[in-house]
Image: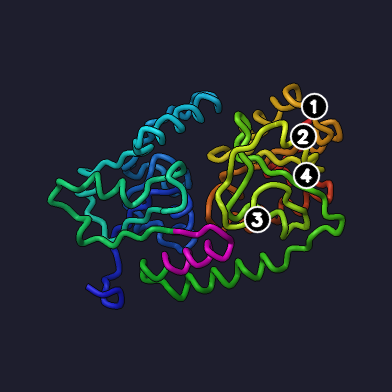
């Protein structure tokens, strides 16, 4: 079956939170028939959950990092998919990702889950979202909309998001900004996050646009001497990131912290996920760089 003749899917499975967010942005919530354990969009409440993680999310950051590292070294998948439930739902579209094996289910995990079942996957369209930049996120939005049969709406949303992104007024002082996607051990932000910093008017001191985030050390961070540190740990909202940032008040002796330029943000909503929330994230950063606080979206930690 060619792409052009592929039928419009009546049932869609989303195996990553950003795809679920995009599907609801596209007005397709009624067609979402199952989600991942990480999908927290309000509209997804009560839907069948098809995935689980081998890592205990309630553990400390150091313990989670250690468990992930050990699993990756052993060649173990970090997530499993309920193949029988996937088979029973019989979706026309399954949405996954190929950006980060640590963050969400990859196509290979889906294939392993249904390999010995008589079910749906050969007939279903598996769409792997690959966006590693803001432009890539908008391309993913278009691809998802096309696969779901609402291509025109996807294009309208992409154009609107690009216009809003372009309208962000950057600060003129160009402060040097370090973003942290993990604090114990420290990981700097990658993918679209450096673009968000630049669009807001900051200078991103560690990490490059459209590349992976990476591990660093507190010694290297001290040597970089950033003007602002933004804690945006992947998988967490504002309150939890504020907790992580607060721990740094006593664990580090950085000029940034002494100057009151340690911040926490809602990573899930605006920074960690390749969805339209990244536009709002850049707006929040711009306001922070001006010294303002976006209530419910950012907080200065002192």
Mark seen at residue 293:
4
For numbered disc 3, what is the local secondary structure? helix
Sequence order check: which comes first, mark 1 or mark 4? 1
Q: Earlier in the sequence, mark 2 or mark 3?
A: 2
* Residue 184 drawn above or below residue 38: above
Q: What stretch is highlighted in magenta?
A: 130-144
Label 2, on which residue?
222
Residue 235's disc is: none
Determine contact: label 4, label 3, CB under 8 Å. Answer: no
First-in-chain label (1 vs 3): 1
The reply to whether callout 2 and callout 4 are in contact (CB within 8 Å) is: no
Q: Do the residues labelled 1 and 2 touch (CB within 8 Å)?
A: yes
**Residue designated by label 1:** 253
Distance from the alpha carbon under mark 2 to that under mark 4: 25 Å
Query: Residue shown at 48%/47% (left/top)?
Result: 41
Q: What numbered label is drawn on residue 280?
A: 3
Q: Nearer the viewer, mark 1 or mark 2?
A: 2
């Amino acid at each position: 079956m060619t792409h052009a003749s592929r039928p419009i899917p009546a049932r869609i499975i989303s195996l990553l939170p950003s795809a679920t967010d995009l599907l609801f942005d596209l007005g397709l919530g009624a067609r979402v028939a199952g989600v991942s354990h990480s999908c927290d969009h309000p509209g997804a409440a009560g839907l069948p959950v098809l995935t689980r993680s081998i890592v205990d999310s309630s553990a400390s950051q150091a313990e989670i990092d250690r468990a992930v590292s050990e699993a990756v070294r052993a060649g173990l998948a970090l997530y499993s998919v309920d193949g029988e439930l996937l088979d029973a739902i019989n979706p026309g579209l399954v949405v996954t990702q190929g950006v980060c094996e640590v963050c969400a289910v990859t196509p290979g995990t889906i294939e392993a889950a249904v390999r010995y079942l008589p079910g749906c996957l050969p007939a279903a369209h598996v769409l792997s979202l690959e966006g590693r930049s803001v432009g890539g996120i908008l391309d993913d939005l278009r691809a998802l909309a096309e696969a779901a049969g609402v291509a025109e709406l996807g294009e309208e949303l992409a154009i609107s998001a690009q216009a809003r992104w372009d309208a962000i007024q950057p600060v003129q002082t160009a402060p040097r900004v370090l973003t942290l996607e993990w604090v114990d051990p420290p990981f700097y932000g990658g993918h679209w996050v450096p673009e968000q910093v630049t669009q807001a008017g900051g200078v991103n001191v560690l990490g490059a646009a459209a590349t992976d985030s990476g591990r660093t050390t507190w010694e290297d961070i001290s040597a970089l001497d950033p003007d602002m540190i933004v804690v945006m740990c992947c998988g967490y909202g504002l309150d939890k990131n504020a907790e992580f940032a607060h721990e740094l008040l006593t664990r580090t002796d950085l000029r940034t912290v002494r100057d009151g330029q340690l911040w926490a943000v809602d990573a899930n909503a605006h920074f960690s996920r390749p969805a339209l929330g990244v536009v709002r994230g850049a707006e929040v950063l711009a306001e922070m760089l001006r010294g303002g606080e976006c209530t419910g979206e950012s907080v200065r930690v002192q």
